[in-house]
Image (spheres, coloured by chain):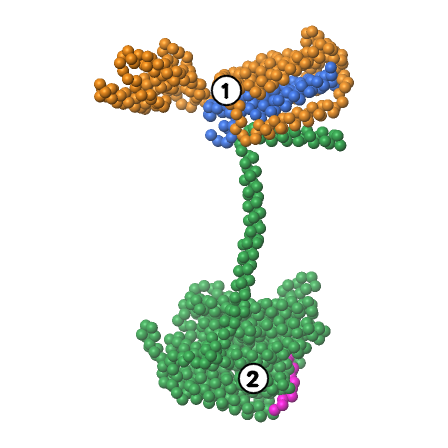
Amino acid sequence: MSPVQLAAAAATGTTSTGEAVQFWVLAVIAVGGALGTVLMRKAVHSALCLAGTMLALAICYMAQGAVFLGVVQIVVYTGAIMMLFLFVVMLVGVTSADSLKETLKGQRWAAALCGLGFGVLLIAGIANAHLHTFSGLGEANSGGNVQGLARLIFTRYVWAFEVTGALLITAAIGAMVLTHHERTEQRASQRELAERRVREGVQVTPLPAPGVYARHNAVDIPGLLPDGTTAEVTVNPTLRARGQIRDVSHDMLRRMEQLESTTADYLGRTLPPRRTVKSPRAPITAGAADEAAEAARTEEEAEQQ
Amino acid sequence: MNPVNYLYLSALLFTIGASGVLIRRNAIVLFMCVELMLNAANLALVTFSRLHGNLDGQIIAFFTMVVAAAEVVVGLAIIVSIFRTRHSASVDDTNLMKL
Amino acid sequence: MNALIPVLVAAPLAGAALLLLGGRRLDAFGHWLGVVASTASFVAGAVLFFDMLGRSTADRPVHQHLFSWVPVGGFRADVGFQLDQLSITFVLLITGVGSLIHLYSVGYMAHDERRRRFFGYLNLFLAAMLLLVLADNYLLLYVGWEGVGLASYLLIGFWQHKPSAATAAKKAFLVNRVGDVGLSIAIMLMFTQFGSFAFGPVFGTAHTASEGKLTAIGLMLLLAACGKSAQVPLQSWLGDAMEGPTPVSALIHAATMVTAGVYLITRSAAIFNLAPDAQLVVVCVGAVTLMFGAIVGCAKDDIKKALAGSTMSQIGYMVLAAGLGPIGYAFAIMHLVTHGFFKAGLFLGAGSVMHGMDDEVNMRHYGGLRKYMPVTFVTFGLGYLAIIGFPGLSGFWSKDRIIEAAFAKGGTEGWILGGVALLGAAITAFYMTRVMIMTFFGEKRWQPNAEGHEPHPHESPSVMTLPMVVLAIGSVFAGGLFALNNAFLHWLEPITGHSEGNAPLGSLTISGLTLLCVAVGVAWSWAVYGRQPVPAVAPVGSALTRAARRDLLQDDFNHAVLVRPGEYLTRGLVYGDTKGLDGFVNGLAATIGGLSSRMRRMQNGFVRSYALSMFGGAAVLVATTLLMRSV
């Protein structure tokens, strides 16, 4: 039974068995989607669940004779607004999972209590309302649902309609104002950037590329320094800001130790003691320290020999 | 089946959305929960329209959608600008009126 | 002629205003301006006096209404003057002695930078005092009363750079306030009782009031008189008031202001006559003060303080006489006038001695001064003879009549009062002889002061001696003039009334007794101070002497009875205020503050907490709506 046929049924003032079946199916989907929205750790998943709920609701609208609203729900809500959400999710960090651990004391319990109480009260209110008979939309939708809505919008609700127009314009301008950044100075030229790098002396050369050669080349995997620690500077700043760095250094170190131990006998060397080096943040100074450590180690080895 | 069931569904969705607002910290998810609440309200309005046999409920639901669209645009813009300054989308991080 | 009455007050008032507001440009001749203002007032008073003499007894009181001061509905406070025999007596005394002392001050204050201001204050005092005695109602009298209090305060503390003077001024002001409260209460009582406080209505309807009420009014008036006239228990300020310049002591704290209490009692005769209990208290106060002042005067080495004790004692005589009722009113005033002459003369003499002795006040450092300042010696001596009641001089006539009146009170009371008055006369003779001998007789005892500067006693300039001579003449002849044919008695009788009382002893007997007492006093004093050298450092003396040197422990008494409990009360109130009131208020504030800081926690800045509150609120709203619908 298509939604349009259901809409026709909705016009009569009675409900069909088909609608009942459809309702229960859609209700399960909608509630499931809603719970998913609330409970999913990742924002993308939440958004998808919400889209599902919205689609289910769109069908519910159509089944109740609100064909126009159902279409708008799909096109505008699910199509445009949810896409906007997804866009922002991508901008802010698609994989950043939200910890579900509560930080505000008692917030979760209070929320549960309030939610439960509110829900019970609402349902009790609806149950108290004695809505056993209803009129149906046959008469109202006789000239077509869209035509009926249009008649109301452009007659009785024309003022509100105009005001919403103003509201939308304001919202658009507001969004622009909020996100727009006026550039107040000249963008630094490449020469200037190069000069600044030399002057600051922190990182004169271009930043090293991410990835561990021959094993990983993803942009979120930092390169390794000679001592096996990660060089976070190799990862894009945006990913660093989001904390989306995949550290494979321990894996690599383990593999190198394995390699050394398996070849130790063959090469006739004793195993160097295990080192734990903190991941250095400033590459050049860290590098210098490493060089010094390296030099000390070679001296040690020379003495042993 | 009685269309009142739609109202029960609406109440349920609304409550779930509200609880989500209270529980989640990610501003985007929080916004989604608000949308969920709005949708629940819309469902109730559409159902009322059917019960009463006129289209006013649908009109109000329509306006709700428009307002929701405006709200989402501004809200997401705010989230983006906050994220720019704080590198975080958690509403708990913005508990002071200064950086 | 009545138009001259306001001039009496206006002349010194204008002088005071000019001198106090005129600024430095008046420094050169300001003191003469003050003398002129005072003399103008005296001339006006004299003209009015002779005008009054020319009228028959019934026509003598003159009343002049100037303007309505506070007209409110049925209530009216007027500014009006009443010039009768009593007022004109005071006017002549005040302006006469006042003018002489103004003249004297020209010399005495010659080297003071602030002389212009001093004369301004003197003129202010004259204006206030004249207002006091000329007022035709108690409210206006109260204005003058406060005015003289203010002038007294300003003049005692004139050398305000001396802490002792500043303190003395404050003390005088505070003690006087106690008396002033009495006067204001008396005025309020009169207003509630008689609906007016003008002399005419009050005295005319006094007999309609109950005796209890009249006694209350009388006691309150007595309290006022005690404050102003330095009577026990409000006597403590007078001795310290000697910190002021000597002309001030002579004018205000001997001749005029301190007699305001006697004037008040005499003026309110109509009330006191109907309240015998109040009169009894007046008599007791007078008798006690008489002895008190006399004993204090015996022990003081400071010449001015000795004279101050004497003043207190002599005013005690006056108050005693005034308390006797119609038997004594006229004699009280008579003694007041003669006392005004000789005590002012004595003070001016003391000032002259101090002037010549580099402001030394300790009589033990005087001695043999009669050779160095003959005019002062003669005038002071005449004043001395007058005050001890040497036959024929002023004090003899007036004091003798008071002692007679005291006996004439009759009964046991009469004997006691008469005895006290006689004893007082003996002690007066003793301490005045002591002052005389220590100052003018014996060998010289002055020593170089701290800077090695030895005083060179010398006679004062004529501008100072002239007033002393005039006052000495008054001291000699005024009493006899008044007593001649009972002239003064007949003069005042229409105002105060008179009755002879029933004296148990004859007039001559009493005079003889008095003279005997005086002779004993003089002889005793001669025996103690005249026959042997006076030690330059005071001997320890008996317990009574030591107490008398400390003003019979008046300050210790006040401190123990009034100041200490006052301090405890204040401390208690402060404690109650800080612990109780402040504790409550601070506790309230702390409670609210604590609650607020708890509530503040709710405003934690977390959006989700706010959302929870909103959601909870929505739930409550839904619940309420449902409840309201189901009910």
Inspect this view and state whether residue A146 appears.
no
Could you tell me which residue is drawn at 60 percent across and 24 percent down? B19
Could you tell me which residue is drawn at 49 percent across and 67 percent down? C170
Q: Chain C: give its colour.
A: green
Q: Quadrant of the N terminus of chain C?
A: bottom right
**Secondary structure mainly formed by the magenta segment:** loop
Where does residue C269 sit, x and y in percent of width and height?
A: 64, 77
- Residue A148 in the magenta stretch? The answer is no
Q: Chain of mark 1?
A: A
Query: In the image, what residue type sits under mark 2?
Result: Val
Chain identifier matching the orange colour in the rendered picture = A
Per the rendering, the mark at residue C420 is 2
Q: Is residue C607 above or below residue C135?
A: above
Q: Chain B: give its colour.
A: blue
Query: In the image, what residue type sits under mark 1?
Result: Ala
- Quickly name the residue at label 1: A97
